[in-house]
Image (cartoon, grey):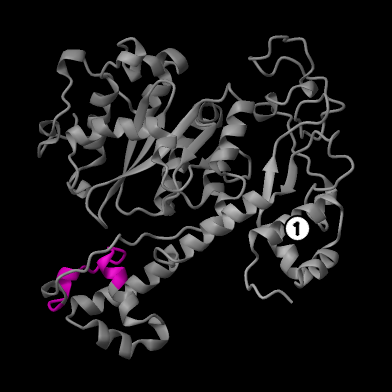
Amino acid sequence: MSKHKHLIFNDRTVIQISLDDRKSFKEIGRILGRDCSTISKEVRNHIVYERTGGYGRAFNDCRFRYTCDTTGVCVTCKNQNRSCKFCGRCIAICPRYVKEICPDLANPPYVCNGCSRKQRCTLEKRVYKAIAAQKEYEQTLRESRTGVNINEAELKRLDVIVTPLIKNGHSIHHICSNNVSSIMISEKTLYKYISSGLLTARNLDMPRKVRMKPRKSGGSVMKVDKACRIGRCFEEFKTYSAQHPELPVTELDSVEGIRGGAVLLTIHFVRPKLQLAFLRQSNDSASVTRIFEDLLQLLGICDYRTILPLLLADNGSEFSDPKAIEFEYKGERISRLFYCDPSAPGQKGHCENNHEFIRRIIPKGKDLGQYTQSQINLAMNHINSYGRPELSNKSPYEMFAFLYGEELLKKLGVVQIPRNQIILTPKLLKTGNDGR
């Protein structure tokens, strides 16, 4: 048996080569001195999805690709008379599209490595690559040693128990000693959650805690379910975007005020540079999901798909429920969500750059909870009416209206401000200014 508890890169290279040679999990396990279930889990946990076609054929995984006689769905095709079954780009907008998955992938080895039909197949490929698997393993290892490993439901349950007791003057030691069966975490961990602003209670609610000099720390963040990123990483975003250049990209991000306070969800339409902002009382995935549900109800499926077909977000916990955003309540896909690489904000630089305008009006460190949604809308109307040199001095409002029409802007509640009346300073949101 292997001396290494975890698989190393050489082991993963052996797995890839063996899969290419069509060896079974048991054979690979004997080579590496591992149980076959270990090899099976390794392969399934690190599958790479590739949307590539076959020899002389474009990618097309529609079930009706051989019998379909539809033409002219994709407006970017040069030949409008060409059958859509020869095009791999129109499947995202074709109303008759039904995804087909190779039935062989439901059985071991679960990947296309070594498949004799791979060169001719036009379906989505699932492959195991040693380099990609090693990178995912190293990233998972780093994340497992940082952050706060608790989900939102458990955090809310803990908050209901702990916060009222702290408000009544109980110490952390007293709370943990008398609620062992319901809290089930150590005193140190509970202190860490409160210091990170994850509970309603704050350090100021604990008299002795505020007298202690805080230790320097890089800060604690909520961990996300890493399984939500499978098939949605930045490399896959670039591939999908290149295959569907007609789909506009929309970047998502959050703007914080004070730690643990209210936050903004920003939705930035890259082509017209128009940005929307929605006030949320807490930075959780449920509040993000509700905003997109309201947008779907407001716009309707047709307009929603027109302006929000391709989304790019960072790795924050607020975006850790992608399926709730990608599918409407009946299970119909309405958009696709991808993630930037960790610690790579430049991959959605358009959104980050536009936040500079928000910071002109709401400086860093300001509590966003003091504002109303009407005031946030007012600020965004002024920002979206401001001319940009890269838009030939047109405003994002004017570019959005040109691309999608003013009716959509009315639905979204976006109003144009006269150029000489635009204010991009904190005085715009003085007390009592609600945008009316």
- As drawn, is 256 to the left or to the right of 407? left
Task: Provide residue 20's location: percent of width, then percent of height.
Answer: 82, 50
The correct choice, above or below, for 182 with respect to 48 in the image is below
Is residue 327 a member of the stretch shown in magenta?
Answer: no
- Identified at 64% across, 50% down, the residue is 131
Which residue is the site of mark 1?
14
Task: Provide residue 329's location: percent of width, then percent of height.
Answer: 57, 46
Location of the N terminus (image quadrant):
bottom right
- Identified at 46% across, 15% down, the residue is 403
The correct choice, above or below, for 392 with respect to 178 in the image is above
The correct choice, above or below, for 410 with respect to 147 in the image is above
In the picture, residue 26 is in which quadrant?
bottom right
Task: Provide residue 202's location: percent of width, then percent of height.
Answer: 21, 68
In the picture, residue 116 is in which quadrant?
top right
Residue 161 visible within the image: no
Q: What type is the residue that disc 1 sits on?
A: Val
Q: How many marks?
A: 1
- As drawn, is 297 to the left or to the right of 35? left
Residue 258 visible within the image: yes
Q: Nearer the viewer, residue 430 or 192?
A: 192
As drawn, which residue projects farthest toward the bottom? Answer: 178
The correct choice, above or below, for 296 with respect to 273 in the image is below
Task: Provide residue 176's location: percent of width, then percent of height.
Answer: 32, 85
Q: Nearer the viewer, residue 297 or 149?
A: 149
- As drawn, is 396 to the left or to the right of 386? right
- Identified at 39% across, 40% down, the residue is 345
Location of the C terminus (image quadrant):
top left
Is residue 200 a member of the stretch shown in magenta?
Answer: yes
- Identified at 76% across, 20% down, the residue is 84
- As drawn, is 328 to the left or to the right of 297? right
Range of residues picked out in magenta:
192-208
Which class describes the residues within 10 Å of circle 1: few (<14), some (14-19), or many (20+)?
some
